Image: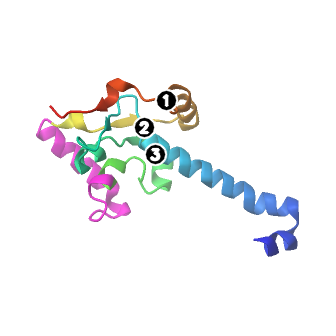
Amino acid sequence: VALLWSGMGTSDFAVVCMVPWMVMGFWLFMVTYLQHHSEDGKLYTDDTFTFERGAFQTVDRDYGKYVNRMSHHMMDGHVMHHLFFTKVPHYRLEDATKALREGMKERGQEHLYKQIDTPDYSQEIVKQFYDNWFYINEDQVVREWK
């Protein structure tokens, strides 16, 4: 990195390397944060957590047709990714997510699945930070499984 910086100069290095790195870093952070946080999300203790319960607390976020396609449906197929990460490749996430939703609906389990339309993702991350950053609503903590 130092050799590249010294060869390019500070301004070229900032434009060619640092700006894209910061944009990518923000995008990855934002997407990851939003996929794992929602208004009705549950927090499980060691006594109440299971793999399946945790997987269904993740959120499929629809960022719009083109963003979903450019990201290989990693964001709108996130629940499927958590449930079957070793079995479903990213290029099958869209079809697998549709099948998951249909199967859950047939079994009366659609209430377990979370999907949130998030076309204004930059506004949503600000909203989530403002409302929920380092704040745990005690009503969301599952201490006993009923």
Q: Earlier in the sequence, mark 3 or mark 1?
A: 3
Mark 3 closeness class: few <14, some 14–19, many ≥20 residues within 10 Å: few
Nearest the camera: 102 or 19?
Answer: 19
Q: Which residue is mark 2?
A: 37
Q: Residue 93 lies in magenta, yes or no?
A: yes
Q: Which residue is mark 1?
A: 132
Q: Which residue is mark 3?
A: 65
Residue positioned 67% across, 58% down in the render: 21
Magenta extent: 82-108
Q: Earlier in the sequence, mark 2 or mark 3?
A: 2
Tag shown at residue 16: none
Nearest the camera: 114 or 40?
Answer: 40
- Number of numbered markers: 3
Q: Residue 83 lies in magenta, yes or no?
A: yes
Q: Residue 49: x and y, percent?
A: 25, 44
| Image: 14 above or below 135 | below
Amino acid type at mark 3? Lys
Residue positioned 87% across, 61% down in the render: 10
